[in-house]
Image (spheres, rainbow, N blue to C red):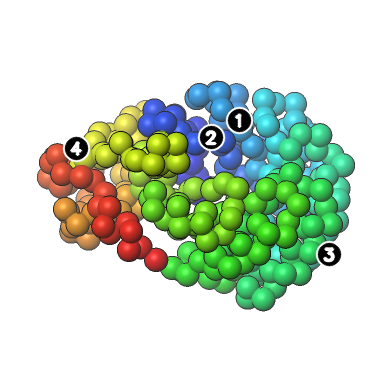
Amino acid sequence: MQDITDLPFWRVMAHYGGPDVYYTEYFRVHSDSRPEKHILRSIDENPDGRPVIAQMIGQDLAALRRTALDLQQRRIAGIDLNLGCPAPIVCKKDAGGGLLRHPEKIDAILGELRTAVHLRFTVKTRLGFDSPDEFPALLDLFRRHPIDALTVHGRTVREMYQPVVHLDAIERAARLMPCPVFANGNVRCVESARRMVEATGARGLMIGRGAIRNPWLFTQIREAWSTGKVRTRPTLADLREYIERLYQETRHPEIRDAGHVGKMKKYLGYIAPGLGTTHDGDAFWTDLKPTLTLRDLFAVCDRHLAASDPAYSTHLERNEQ
């Protein structure tokens, strides 16, 4: 989600209802680092005033403490330590998911940050680096520190974004941790959100890629939880409007056309597979991939997304694994 869920993307999400809490892109923390200005803008220009958690990634103890103290001068609700990013370039530096190979270092970092953070201090983790069998020991480690919430992505670092999500591991965390546990992984629709909560007992959900695919998802989940019914049913034409809004918010006058096309394809790579049975997402993506200009890209969108058919198929979503 790094370099995708930035401030312009937050503005788009806010237009469609937005989450209850925002997590920033992660601040890259090392001995010479200073909080990135474009991420600080997400905090300073928060589009709807809902709580913001500032996320950090790194393994330098002094730098993490310094950055946490710095960020707490901003309008944030808390600090989050990222132990979940599986990107090889991050793990190579023993940051993100790479830190899961070094529990003793995590132990020291949690102790240092807990004393430095006077706001909420939360952690996001995967189940381990190589195997879910690593997770019970990690849970014991997390339980030794008075963190305020734990988000569990139900895969290991090695599993990246494979279809399997180990719901039993998230359930174990929700049962054993003294703090609230939030579940993360493959929440793409109301039905998958409901299954996740029922199977794990998690107190909340963290949603990333599913929100790119369907910006109405937060509103739909709130509707389902409060009334038992989902009233918000976007059409293909609504989806086309969402794509246009994404472009208008993220475009920059100094970036050439090809750069905008690349940025839009990042989003569309998440959106296309989510189309329901009323439309062929594979054909949409096949037509999008060779486009080199914005004119051609939006022509493909116009060709595929001009109908009043539902954008997301309830039947398909109920059978997602």
Q: Is residue 91 visible?
A: no
Whole-percent x and y of residue 60? Answer: 79, 52
Residue drawn at the location 68% of the way across and 48% of the way down? 180
Q: Nearer the viewer, residue 148 or 254?
A: 148
Residue drawn at the location 23% of the way across and 46% of the way down? 311
Q: Which mark is residue 104?
A: 3
Residue drawn at the location 61% of the way across and 33% of the way down? 52
Instruction: Describe residue 99's horizontal placement relative to residue 47 as left or right.
Output: right
| CB contact under 8 Å: marks 2 and 1 | yes
Q: Nearer the viewer, residue 70 or 231?
A: 231
Whole-percent x and y of residue 268? Answer: 31, 49
Residue beneath label 2, please? 20
Q: Nearer the viewer, mark 3 or mark 4?
A: 4
Mark 4 residue element:
helix
Mark 3 or mark 4: whose residue is earlier in sequence: 3
Residue beneath label 1, please? 51
Q: Nearer the viewer, mark 3 or mark 2?
A: 2
**Callout 2 amino acid:** Asp
Mark 3 or mark 2: whose residue is earlier in sequence: 2
**Callout 3 amino acid:** Glu
Q: Nearer the viewer, mark 1 or mark 3?
A: 1
**Callout 1 amino acid:** Pro
Mark 4 or mark 1: whose residue is earlier in sequence: 1
Q: Which mark is residue 237?
A: 4
Quadrant location of the C terminus?
bottom left
Mark 1 or mark 3: whose residue is earlier in sequence: 1
Instruction: Describe residue 18's horizontal placement relative to residue 88 as left or right.
Output: left
